[in-house]
Image (spheres, rainbow, N blue to C red):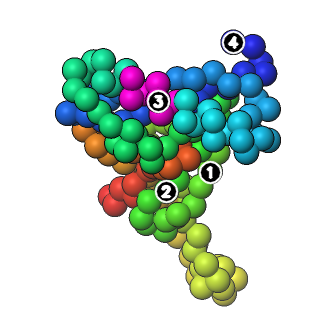
């Protein structure tokens, strides 16, 4: 695939097994709403075909119509924090796969700044640790648009 090509991914878990389909698309698909919907339908149909073939079961379109489809970028990925002080925040990670854990500084707020100005000792930088959130079948969880979901890990 060339530099003007992205890979769309659609996946699901059936009977504890992860099934996925990869569909190459031109980067222009991001600017064309019709092309986006067509590519998403194509990815879902490919996934249904593969899952039906491997399971030997008749799987209906309804089982696949709402599955998320996202673009995989070779140089970055999105991460969404779940729970803790960074709940709901997103960040871009500079690799295709995120790390095993993420340590993020905790905002001490105005009270922490005022205490530092008044001469009180500044506490060590507090941090919040986030680890991959597990989803169906023990696989890493992702949002509808493909961001990796990371859960707050209380120490």
Q: Is residue 46 magenta?
A: yes
Kindly identify which residue carries mark 2.
81
Which residue is under mark 1?
91
Q: Nearer the viewer, mark 3 or mark 1?
A: 3
N-term mark: 3 or 1: 3
Q: Which residue is mark 4?
A: 1
User: Which span of residues is magenta-colored?
Assistant: 43-49
Say which element carries label 4. Answer: loop
Cα–Cα gap, marks 1 and 4: 27 Å
Image position of 66 (left or right of 30): left
| Classed neighbour count for the residue bearing mark 2: other residues with Cα under 10 Å, few (<14), some (14–19), many (≥20) | many
Q: Please identify, in this view, whether the residue under mark 4 or under mark 3 is nearer the observer.
A: 3
Give the Cα separation between the discs numbered 4 and 3. 22 Å
Q: Earlier in the sequence, mark 3 or mark 2?
A: 3
Residue 9 in sight from this viewpoint: no
Residue under label 3 = 45
- Dot placed on the residue nearer the N-terminal end, 1 or 4: 4
Query: Which quadrant of the rendered structure holds the C terminus?
Result: bottom left
Q: Secondary structure at mark 1?
A: strand
Nearer to us of marks 3 and 2 is 3
Image position of 36 (left or right of 41) = right
Disc 2 + disc 1, Cβ < 8 Å: yes
Q: Residue at x 57, y 37 (%)?
A: 40
State which quadrant residue 77 falls in.
top right
Tag 3 near tag 1, CB within 8 Å: no
The local secondary structure at tag 2 comes to strand
CA neighbours of label 4 inside 10 A, class few (<14), some (14 to 19), many (20+):
few
User: Is residue 18 on the magenta stretch?
Assistant: no
- Label number found at residue 124: none
């Amino acid at each position: 695939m060339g530099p003007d090509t992205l890979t769309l991914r659609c996946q699901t878990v059936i009977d504890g097994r992860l099934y996925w389909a990869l569909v190459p698309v031109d980067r222009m698909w991001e600017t064309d709403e019709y092309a986006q919907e067509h590519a998403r339908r194509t990815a879902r149909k490919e996934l249904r075909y593969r899952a039906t073939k491997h399971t030997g079961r008749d799987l209906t379109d309804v089982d696949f119509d709402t599955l998320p489809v996202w673009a995989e970028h070779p140089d970055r990925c999105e991460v969404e924090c779940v729970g803790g002080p960074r709940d709901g925040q997103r960040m871009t990670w500079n690799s295709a796969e995120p790390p095993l854990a993420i340590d993020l500084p905790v905002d001490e707020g105005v009270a922490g700044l005022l205490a530092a100005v008044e001469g009180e000792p500044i506490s060590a930088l507090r941090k919040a640790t986030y680890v991959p959130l597990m989803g169906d079948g023990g696989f890493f969880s992702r949002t509808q648009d493909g961001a990796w979901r990371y859960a707050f890990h209380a120490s």
